[in-house]
Image (cartoon, rainbow, N blue to C red):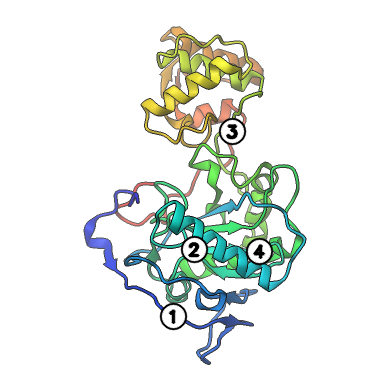
Amino acid sequence: MVRGGVTRRSFLVGGLTLAGTGLVGGTIASGRAWAAAPAGPAIIDCAGWGARPNSAVVPIWNQRPVKILVHHTATPNVADLSRGSAESLARGIQKFHMDVRGWLDTGQHFTVSRGGFVLEGRHRSLEVLQAGQRQVEGAHCTGQNVVAVGIENEGTYLSVNPPGALWDSLRALCVLICSRYGIRPTEIYGHRDFKNTACPGDRLYGMLPRLRTEVARGLGRPLVEGEADKESWPLLRPGDRGPQVQAAQYLLRAAGMREVAPSGRYDRLTAAAVLRFQELTQAEDVGMIGGETWPVLARTVRRDAGGDAERAVEVLAAQRGTESVPDVVTPREWRRLLGTGGAPADTSTDPEGPPR
């Protein structure tokens, strides 16, 4: 798994976790108190849902995570909201991650079921969160596994919102994580912010500004206007059309994919070029342009450089109307032109070593 460039001195070796206790109602079953943050949810630990032992040492890093990544499981939106269903989901995820993907354990740190049950994902995640000083290395997003806590939310949220019970528990869990680790609520992201994926679904992703706002309120630190909207990259998929697609097509041509016609339609030739570009850049080849491919594709460009890259700028500038465009278009300026500017990421809490 990718370790995000973290220095060796910051790494502490964890151990094989073979057993544990269930967490019910905010206290561990053995009687040891859980000093929860405000509105901290009850969390069912690995033993509580019948997890298999992890197959290798769980890596633990001697640093705090600096962000939270929200995912959806892309599983059916089941009507069974019971604890039993939640535990069955956790076992199914672990089986897939270990037996199909070949990972040492569940990839995410925590899982929230549609019924609002919160479960520990990877072994030792709950223990380490309780201490609030270190980070269990996950396997939920390449490049983010050491610096971000991964939360899977049961269901598929491309066209529907998550149920209220799930939302309430996700918010409470984020409040707890932010409180324990000193993470700012503005540092809550979706999986697609860093990968070419639809995860956590269009609807749940669109609710992240609300989540940041509500988590900040739960921490007693209300956000100022506009702070909940973060810089991001748009997700483009086959069948999409418009200026964003046309700009991406010009950028693909500038990168050598000359077979692409800048029509503004994400057609078959565009999809093939995207796959080839992703193969060349060693990105996940899913045929979508998201948070992993945009930063490579939308490189810094001068407006007077000519060629297809400048044409991409012109397409987006025309859409934005009277807004001024600087002579040098940086990644942040690209996001503004693409309509996904928002507030910049906060880097003040980054630990020494891992890049963001």
- Where is 78 relative to 238, above or below? below
How packed is label 2: few (under 14 Cα within 10 Å), some, or many (20 or more)? Answer: many
Against 40, is 121 above or below? above
In the rendered structure, which disc, 2 or 3, sits on the residue that comes first in sequence?
Answer: 2
Q: Position of residue 155 (x, y in %)?
A: 67, 54
Residue 189 left/right relative to 5? right
Name the residue tied to disc 1: 19
**Horizontal side of residue 242 vs 6, given as left or right:** right
Residue located beneath label 4 in the image: 113
Task: Give the number of the mark in front: 2 or 1.
Answer: 1
SS at circle 1: loop
Indicate which label's residue lies in the foreground, 2 or 3: 2
Q: Nearer the viewer, residue 232 or 216?
A: 232
Mark 4 or mark 3: which is in front? 4
C-alpha distance separating marks 2 and 1: 17 Å
Q: Is residue 318 visible?
A: yes
Q: Secondary structure at mark 3?
A: loop
**Depth order, front residue of 222/207:** 207
Secondary element at tag 2: loop
Name the residue at 55% across, 34% down.
233
Q: Which residue has dot 3 on it?
A: 235
Instruction: Please name the residue that numbered disc 2 is placed on.
Output: 109
Amino acid type, mark 3: Leu
Sequence-earlier tag: 4 or 1:
1
Closer to us: mark 1 or mark 3? 1
At 39% from the left edge and 65% from the top edge, which residue is drawn? 135
Q: CA distance from mark 2 to mark 3?
A: 25 Å
